[in-house]
C-alpha cells in the first residue's frame, strides 16, 4: 500500500500549471456546510477545476456570492479549504504537510481569476 | 439515533429489506440514479453475503442512513465499474483497503431536512464515523470511496483526512469522484 495517496508538487511547479474549469453549482439545500467565514444566509456553492497535462491535478473549493464592491452585479469569494489530490510543498526536499499544502493552495486560488469563468458557467447553468 | 453494523445474514431479514427500500428511495427516486432494482429494493452485484453494512435508524426504528463496505481484495464498485476515476493509477486490491459506497443519510421523516442534504446532518457524520470504525475493525487501514463530491465536506466536518484519487467525472450532471480516506487519524 502506497504511503502517499496524493500528487506531490512544489509551489513553483504548481504556479506553472494552468487549471481549467470543470463544473460549478449552487448548494442544493440550506443545510450545506459552510467553510470558514461563510454566512448561513449567503448564496453558496462549489467550483471544480482540473489541471492540463500529467499528472492530472484536481481542485475544488466552496464559494459564497456577495454584492459587488461597486454596487452592481455580484462577486464570488472562496470560503474554506480547497479539496484536491495534491500535496504542495515550498521546496523539493520539504516534508509533506497537508495543512501547509492547504495554505499554499489557498494562495494559488486567491491569486487566480477563477471567479469570472465560474460566474459565466453559473449563469449558463441556471439561466432560465 | 442507533447504528447497527453487519452482513445481510447478521442483520435481520426485515431490516435488510428496509435498507434495500431506503436505498431505492434515496438513489433512484430522489437522486435519479439508474441502478438495478429487485422487488422495490436497490441492490446490485456487490450486495453479496460477505458485504458489510452500517445502518442508521432513528428513535422510532426508521432507517435514516446506510453505508456499504467491501474489501478491495474482492470485486467492488470502483474496481469493476469506475476504474477510470483512479486517474490512471491501478485500482486498489488489498485486505487493508476497503471501499465505502452507497453512503446516504437522508431522513425522510424529518420535516426540516431536505431530501438532497444527505451529506450534511449529524446523522451523516455519525454514520461516517461508525462506518470507518467498523471497517477498521475488519483490518482496513485506508478506505476508497466512489461518491458525489459532497462527501468531501462531510469528511472534513467529521475530522477525517481525505484525498482525491483523481478528478471528478460528471455523470447525470453531478460530479462523482474517488476519494481516499485515512482510517488512522493523526494523533490517534
Image (cartoon, coloured by chain):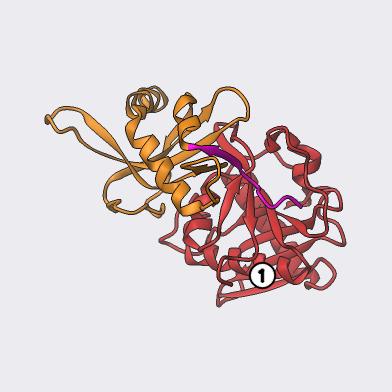
Chain colours: A orange, B red
Q: Residue furthest front?
A: A93
Residue at the (81%, 51%) spot, across then down: B46
Q: Is residue A27 above or below residue B68?
A: above
Q: Position of residue B172 (x, y in %)?
A: 59, 32
Magenta highlight on residue A100: no
- Residue pointed to by mark 1: B133
In the drawing, does residue A118 fall left or right of residue B15? left
Magenta residues (range): A1-10
Residue at the (50%, 49%) spot, across then down: B116
Q: Is residue B166 above or below residue A113?
A: below
Within 10 Å of disc 1 (Cα), the crowding (few <14, some 14-19, many 20+) is some
Q: Position of residue B99 (x, y in %)?
A: 73, 54
Q: Quadrant of residue B129?
A: bottom right
Q: Position of residue B45 (x, y in %)?
A: 84, 48
Residue at the (23%, 31%) spot, across then down: A74
Q: Position of residue A32 (x, y in %)?
A: 41, 52
In the drawing, does residue B96 fall left or right of residue A22? right
Secondary structure at numbered mark 1: helix
In the drawing, does residue A12 fall left or right of residue B144? left
Q: Chain of mark 1?
A: B
Amino acid at each position: 500500500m502506497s504511503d502517499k495517496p496524493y500528487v506531490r508538487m512544489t509551489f513553483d511547479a504548481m504556479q506553472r500549471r494552468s487549471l481549467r474549469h470543470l463544473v460549478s453549482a449552487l448548494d442544493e439545500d440550506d443545510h450545506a456546510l459552510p467553510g470558514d467565514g461563510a454566512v448561513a444566509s449567503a448564496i453558496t456553492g462549489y467550483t471544480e477545476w482540473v489541471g492540463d497535462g500529467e499528472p492530472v491535478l484536481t481542485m475544488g473549493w466552496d464559494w459564497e456570492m456577495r454584492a459587488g464592491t461597486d454596487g452592481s452585479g455580484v462577486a464570488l469569494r472562496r470560503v474554506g479549504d480547497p479539496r484536491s489530490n495534491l500535496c504542495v510543498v515550498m521546496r523539493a526536499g520539504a516534508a509533506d504537510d497537508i495543512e501547509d499544502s492547504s495554505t499554499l493552495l489557498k494562495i494559488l486560488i486567491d491569486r487566480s481569476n477563477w471567479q469570472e469563468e465560474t460566474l459565466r458557467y453559473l449563469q449558463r447553468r441556471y439561466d432560465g | 439515533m442507533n447504528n447497527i453494523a453487519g452482513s445481510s445474514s447478521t442483520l435481520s431479514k426485515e431490516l435488510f429489506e428496509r435498507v434495500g427500500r431506503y436505498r431505492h428511495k434515496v438513489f433512484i427516486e430522489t437522486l435519479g440514479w439508474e441502478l438495478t432494482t429487485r422487488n422495490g429494493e436497490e441492490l446490485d452485484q456487490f450486495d453479496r453475503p460477505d458485504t458489510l453494512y452500517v445502518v442508521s435508524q432513528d428513535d422510532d426504528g426508521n432507517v435514516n442512513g446506510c453505508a456499504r463496505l467491501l474489501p478491495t481484495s474482492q470485486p467492488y464498485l470502483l474496481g469493476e465499474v469506475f476504474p477510470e476515476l483512479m486517474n490512471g493509477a491501478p485500482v486498489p486490491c488489498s485486505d487493508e483497503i476497503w471501499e465505502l459506497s452507497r453512503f446516504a443519510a437522508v431522513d425522510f421523516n424529518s420535516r426540516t431536512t431536505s431530501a438532497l442534504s444527505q451529506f450534511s446532518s449529524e446523522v451523516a457524520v455519525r454514520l461516517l464515523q461508525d462506518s470507518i470504525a467498523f471497517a477498521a475493525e475488519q483490518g482496513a487501514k485506508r478506505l476508497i470511496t466512489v461518491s458525489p463530491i459532497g462527501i468531501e465536506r462531510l469528511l472534513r466536518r467529521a475530522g477525517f483526512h481525505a484525498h482525491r484519487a483523481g478528478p471528478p467525472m460528471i455523470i447525470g450532471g453531478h460530479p462523482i469522484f474517488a476519494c481516499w480516506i485515512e482510517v488512522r487519524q493523526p494523533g490517534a
